[in-house]
Amino acid sequence: DNAGHAEFAVSNNTVVPDLIKISAESIDKIIQNIKDSQLFDGNKVATMGMSMGGLINFYQASFLNNPPTCLVSIVSIPDYAVLKGNNLIYQKYVDGKLEPATTEEEVSKINNLLDAYSPITNISKLANIPTFMINGTNDEYMPITSVREYVTTASKLNNKIRLLELEGETHTLSSEAYNIFLPEVFAFLKENF
């Protein structure tokens, strides 16, 4: 997650939606470097993210210059409005760690950024990227109903959107869930390269 989990430093009081944007910009630069290097086929780059990593990948694919060839999202969603009210998103970076955003100004800023940065607002671009979404039916942060709504809407624009629902799984997936979805992820990647 780059900045999201302190893989690189950001300035104090940077809020989670800005962490998502900063991390996505970093991924976009990496993809551009791959293309520029000509060591690899820059048209065959997949991104895969879990939870905040998925939020970052959706943002990067929707708004920046180097969308991936395909995208794998695990326990995530491209509609940031769903995250409103979730305490995990109402945080800021202070002295190398995330702390709650407590002032009205911070909460208002986060709500405004969730609206501005939501990949769902650029669904026509996002829907053209083959996407494999893996979500638990009991996810307490990324409601399966919202994931299904996105998949239904995006599927009308492109039929390369796939959802694997893991029955009974929460946001913290069990080892059995990994055994189920990892072979399908590899098949999806092979199919889209």
Image (cartoon, helix red, strand yellow):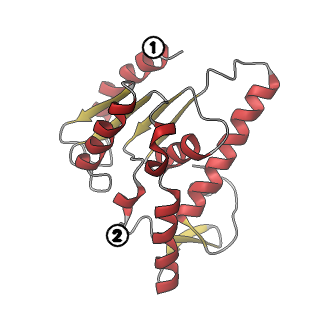
Pick the quarter of the image with the C terminus. top right
Q: Is residue 2 visible?
A: no
Q: Quadrant of residue 182?
A: top left
The residue drawn where x is 36% and y is 44% is 75
**Name of the residue lying farthest toward the right:** 37
Q: Secondary structure at mark 1?
A: helix
Q: N-terminal of the two: label 2 or label 1?
A: 2
**Residue that appears at 33% across and 47% down:** 172
Residue 109 placement (x, y as % from top left): 52, 75
Q: Is 160 or 168 nearer to us in this picture?
A: 160
Residue 42 lies, in percent from the top left, at: 69, 23
**Nearer to us in this view, 65 or 30:** 65
Instruction: Give the labeled residue for mark 1.
Output: 191
Q: Which residue is mark 2?
A: 85
> Hey, what amino acid is under mark 2?
Gly
Instruction: Say the numbered circle drawn on residue 52.
Output: none
Image position of 102 with respect to 72: above or below: below
The amino acid type of the residue labelled 1 equals Glu
Determine which quarter of the picture holds residue 85: bottom left
Question: On the rendered structure, is 29 left or right of 177?
Answer: right
Q: Quadrant of residue 66?
A: top right
Counting the numbered discs, the total is 2
Residue found 42% across the figure and 19% down from its top: 188
